[in-house]
Amino acid sequence: MGSYNIAVVGVGAVGEEMLKVIDERNFPASSIRILARTPRTIVVRNKEYLVEATDAESFNNVDIALFAGTEGEKGAAVRFAEAAISRGAVVIDNGADFRMRQDVPLVVPEVNAAALDNHRGLIANPNCSTAQLVIALKPLHDAARVKRVIVSTYQAVSGAGSAAVTELADQNNSVSGGTEVKSSVFSQQIAYNVIPQIGGFDDAGYSSEEMKLVHETRKILGDDSILVTPVVAARVPVNTGHSEAVYVELEKPLTAAQAIELWNEFPGVSVWNDSLDPKRAYPTPLEAAGSDETYIGRVRNDLYNPYALVFWIVSDNLRKGAATNAVQIAEALVERNLLRRN
Ligand SMILES: NC(=O)c1ccc[n+]([C@@H]2O[C@H](COP(=O)([O-])OP(=O)(O)OC[C@H]3O[C@@H](n4cnc5c(N)ncnc54)[C@H](OP(=O)(O)O)[C@@H]3O)[C@@H](O)[C@H]2O)c1
């Protein structure tokens, strides 16, 4: 295996986690260039890194560019992904700007690594809530075909970036200190609250975060016939770890025990469904935070339909939902000999 020049673009909540994951997994990096808007020095896992301002020339000689900058017109990927690709890098983007483009593979390696084979320099990482959902759905889909998914999400504040984590901490202090609560990242107070909106609403009343679950799930599982109803994507006052309550209807009947067997064989899944063990009865965000696993619990058949299951999924949104998945995509590119300068 060779060794690669890496660029990490953006060092907010996800970018910083990416540096940790590259280090933890011993990704074969011959150099790591860290790019953002403001040049500075940062310390991650006791290592000091220099952060440079991003421009097109920053991508000279870069083999893999991991983008974790803000989305949209002023964001890093829209401004610089093309510059990186034209200089020979493969871009792995965490944002939503390119996920649904037909020529951009949207990849969770355990689920659809083969989609990488036809990449044209740009690969997208799914939204954090989609990543954990498709991991849970994939083995069920292979065994019994998923026809319909009804899902509600309970999403941590770090999903909205590092400024959101600070806002929750500040609001908690304001509430306990009896001072005025100020909101700028979130539309309403998130401390001691639940906000049933993430992103803007469309004409039908669904939020952009809810519609990501619909479109991205179908693209990653490669099946547009799957019906996905996102009941709500809610923001909860949790720092890290998204939770999801899921109802899945299948083409063939499947018992909860059979589903657990399928998940136990699937990479990256841990089933915590032991009613006799209070420590493993079900997963919570606190337990998932810092881990790369997708945890599944509260597994049972629907009360009325033997073709349907209900369960609970929890995963660290900054890791499997973003940084770890991006680094796993980079590892898969190496394994499959798909880097442009291999
Ligand atoms: N947080 C999650 O759970 C999660 C999960 C999946 C995907 N994502 C996606 O990952 C991306 C990063 O999210 P985040 O939560 O890490 O955000 P964040 O904490 O707000 O950090 C954003 C970073 O992007 C940098 N940046 C912004 N515009 C830039 C530009 N034009 N050029 C270069 N750097 C730029 C910022 O630079 P400065 O530090 O200099 O300001 C900052 O370091 C977003 O697209 C987000 O949608 C996030």
Image: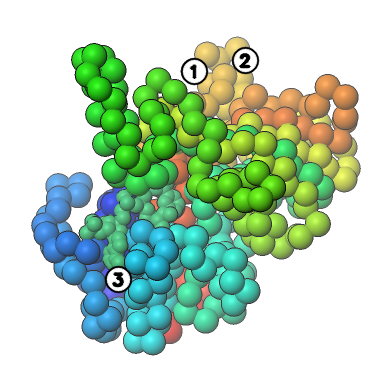
Q: Give the amino acid at mark 3.
A: Ile
Q: Give the amino acid at mark 1.
A: Lys
Q: Disc 1, disc 3: CB below 8 Å?
A: no
Q: At which x and y percent is residue 140?
A: 74, 45
| Quadrant of the image occupied by residue 119 | bottom right
Q: Specify whether tag 2 is near ligand 1 (CB below 8 Å).
A: no
Disc 1, SS: helix
Chain-order first, disc 3 or disc 2? 3
* Nearest to the observer: residue 32 or residue 208: 208
Above-or-below relation of 112 to 180: below
On-image quarter of the C terminus:
bottom left
Q: Which residue is mark 3?
A: 6
Q: Give the amino acid at mark 2.
A: Ser
Circle 2 packing at 10 Å, graded few (<14), some (14-19), many (20+), is few
Q: Which residue is mark 2?
A: 275
Above-or-below relation of 313 to 324: above
